[in-house]
Structures are given as C-alpha cells and as structure tokens.
Image (cartoon, rainbow, N blue to C red):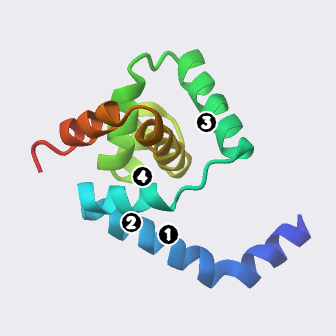
Amino acid sequence: MKSFQHWHKTNEATINAGNEILLDKLAQGINGVEWLVAQIVIDEYRIESLERWLFFLKIHKHTDVRKVMQHALLLNEKKFYRRYRCNWWISVDETLTHLRLQKERDYDWYFDFLNETYKER
C-alpha cells in the first residue's frame, strides 16, 4: 500500500491535470467527446476492461447499456453514482473505449449515438 501512496503523491499533479482535461472536454459536448475518443488507443487491456464493465452492468441489471453510456457522458459523478451505483470515472473511460471501437467498426452507430446523446444541447 505504501508504494501506491508514494506513486500517487509523485504523480498527483499529472493525475489532476488529466482529470481536469477530461471534465473540460466532457463539458464541451460532442466536440470534446470526439477529441477524447481520438485519444483512446485500443489494446488488449482496454478490450478486456470493457468486457468486464459490460458484464458488471449485466449482472447489476442495467439492461440499457446505451443509456448508461449516455449518462456517463452527461451526468456528474454524484448523480451518475446515485442512479447506477457504479463508478463514474470508470464508466466514462469504458464508454470512450466503446465509442472508439464503434467509430472504427460502425461509424453510423457512433454518429447516431453522439447525435442522440447531445440532441438537446
């Protein structure tokens, strides 16, 4: 545990800067999300993590995964947790991973998802 605390303290400024960038880009709407999606590099770890997150949603009976992903992008951390009892930071990360995959595999789905998510904004 000491080594994690040391690592966190050493990297705290970087972590905080990354979090601020994420929050700023989410506040920008579609353009910010597009920028965040473009930063995602898909690797085996990200795919496995996404699969675990989707399984978590399934066993907790969150059947409308699309709605969970939309809310991850639109709600703040507290509102999201109250609604889904799920970590918002992880959900945003997994949503961005899913969007990156969809952008490459099915651009129409990706385009429709973003437009539906931000239609009222």
Which-is-in-front pick, marks 2 and 4? 2
Pick the residue in front: 90 or 116. Answer: 116
The residues bearing labels 1 and 2 have C-alpha atoms spaced at a distance of 6 Å
Label 4 secondary element? helix
Q: Quadrant of residue 110?
A: top left
Which residue is located at x 83 percent, y 78 percent?
6
Q: Are marks 1 and 2 in contact (CB under 8 Å)?
A: yes
Q: How many marks?
A: 4
Q: Residues within 10 Å of mark 3 (few under 14, many from 20)?
A: many
Q: Amino acid at mark 3?
A: Leu
Q: Amino acid at mark 2?
A: Leu
The residue carrying mark 1 is 19
Q: Residues within 10 Å of mark 2 (few under 14, many from 20)?
A: some
The residue carrying mark 2 is 23
The residue carrying mark 3 is 50
Which-is-in-front pick, marks 3 and 4? 3
Q: Are marks 4 and 1 in contact (CB under 8 Å)?
A: no
Label 1 secondary element? helix
Pick the residue in front: 72 or 112. Answer: 112
Furthest-right residue in this view: 2
